[in-house]
Image (tube, grey):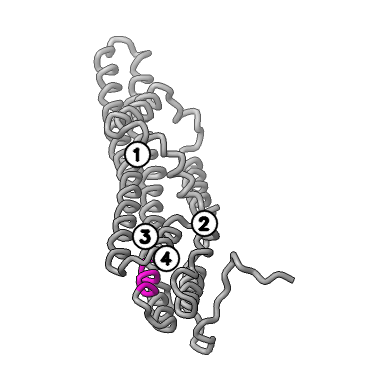
Amino acid sequence: MDFATLIGLFCSVVLVGLAIGDPNNFINIPGLCIVLGGTVGAVLVNYPVRVVARTGAVIRKVLSNPPSRTAQVIGQILEISLIARREGLLAVEPLIQEESDPFMRKGMQLLVDGLEPQTINSIMESEIAGAEGRHEVGVEMLSSMAAYAPAMGLIGTVIGLVQMLGNMKDPGTIGPAMAVALLTTFYGAILANLVCLPICGKLKMRSREEVLLMEMQLSGIVGVAKGENPRIIKEMLETFQPPHERASRTEPPYAFQRQSRTSKP
């Protein structure tokens, strides 16, 4: 669970709530219908239903906080490299079934199949490009919602002003019409700036992290396919890590642990 996201949303809601005072003054059902209904309707027009249906998965990705896997990936690649050098590439095949990451598993399978490093690189780069494209769809959808919400608020403001100006003879209608006019703009700004844009930014960050990990896996698999020295592969993979995560230079060059292969008592 990403507590930073939850804390940020909580602080935003609480601070805005304290600023507005009595919340009853800011509740307007017609205004909410205009903003929420208009935003959802515009998104459904712009994107296929299958894309919009994945919104739940997008939100879960934002709320999740997966630990860094770079050290684990380095350990996996080094083990594969050592096994390949000692016993040949076919000896890596038993490890494929243990691997839960689809991208890594595919790279290992291509390695066992004996494909050329250039071919492996081309196939896995296509996989990375496909993953980036899927991530971009989610980011674009949230960005579109951030653009539609204020626009729907503006439409609600125009509706409220028209209602108010059309019934100036009846003072009792001026207040509700003015509330619609002002609150729809408020709802649109809140939805865009406290929900859609922050989620969009977090999705971009998650996408960069995932793509970086895939590029790291690709570099390691291609290095093994080229028959490079495990020490060189380790040095190359550590360039994907921030300095504070890199292994100490005093450690043995092949010091690592795989979580899937713990020693049995």
Most common SS among magenta residues = helix
The residue under label 2 is 100
- Identify whether 69 is placed above or below 27: below
The residue under label 1 is 189
* Quarter location, residue 124: bottom left
Q: CA distance from mark 1 to mark 3?
A: 32 Å
Looking at the picture, which amino acid does disc 1 mark?
A: Ala
The residue under label 3 is 211
In this view, the mark in front (3 or 2) = 2
In this view, the mark in front (1 or 4) = 4
Give the magenta range. 218-225
In this view, the mark in front (2 or 1) = 2
In this view, the mark in front (2 or 4) = 4
Q: Quadrant of the C terminus?
A: bottom right
The mark that comes first in sequence, 4 or 3, is 4
- Mark 2, secondary structure of its residue: loop
Q: Nearer the viewer, residue 193 or 93?
A: 93
Q: Which residue is located at x 39 percent, y 39 percent?
A: 190
The residue under label 4 is 112
Looking at the picture, which amino acid does disc 4 mark?
A: Val
The mark that comes first in sequence, 1 or 4, is 4
